[in-house]
Image (spheres, grey):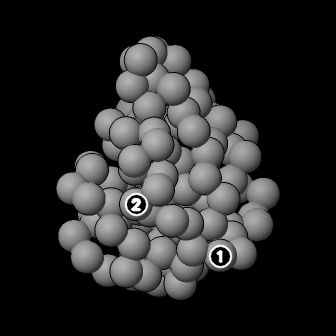
Amino acid sequence: MQTILTVRTTNRGTWRETFGGISEFAKTCAWNVQPVDARHRPPDCRQLLGFWHPAGIVVDASGGAANLRGCDFGGTPAVAINPDERIGGSIPEIANDPDEIAKLALAELLGLNPATLV
């Protein structure tokens, strides 16, 4: 079973939803999801990689990325979601855009030709 590290940088309640979504998806792939708390101090990336040998890393950077600056993920595939600030390096970042999500949802609903949207 492969391990995916999920790095938490936020105290926001959205972390539960984010982690829950990652965990649900991981079940379909038979992945072990290991949370890493980076809210108060930088994680020891070398130690984490050496112990877990993760197949990938997901960083919820919505609480900021100050504790991850200079963190070397050693070539392990990593992605930052909802970053408040850039982590740096070559980590791709995915930002949530509520306006675009709402536009797509409305377009889909209107495509159903409903009598009302109330």
Residue 1 marker: none
Image quadrant holding the C terminus, namely top right
Q: Is residue 84 left or right of residue 104?
A: right
Residue 34, given in percent of the width and then of the height, sits at: 57, 39
- Residue plotted at (47% across, 56% down): 47
User: The residue under label 2 is which amino acid type?
Assistant: Arg
Question: Between 115 and 56, which is closer to the camera in this rendering?
Answer: 56
User: The residue under label 1 is which amino acid type?
Assistant: Arg
Closer to viewer: mark 2 or mark 1:
2
Q: Quadrant of residue 2?
A: top left
- Residue plotted at (48% across, 75% down): 68
Residue 1, given in percent of the width and then of the height, sits at: 41, 17
Per the model, the C-alpha gap separating discs 2 and 1 is: 15 Å
Q: Residues within 10 Å of mark 1 (few under 14, many from 20)?
A: few
Residue at which label 1 appears: 41
Q: Is residue 30 above or below residue 63?
A: above
Q: Is residue 43 above or below residue 28?
A: below
Residue at which label 2 appears: 46
The tag earlier along the polypeptide, 2 or 1, is: 1
Q: Residues within 10 Å of mark 2 (few under 14, many from 20)?
A: few
Q: Is residue 116 left or right of residue 76?
A: right
Does the rendering let one see residue 75?
yes
Mark 1 lies on a secondary structure that is loop
Q: Is residue 17 above or below residue 72?
A: above
Mark 2 lies on a secondary structure that is helix
Question: Between 93 and 88, which is closer to the camera in this rendering?
Answer: 88
How many marks on residues?
2
Residue 41, given in percent of the width and then of the height, sits at: 65, 76
- Residue plotted at (61% across, 45% down): 35
- Residue plotted at (53% across, 84% down): 66
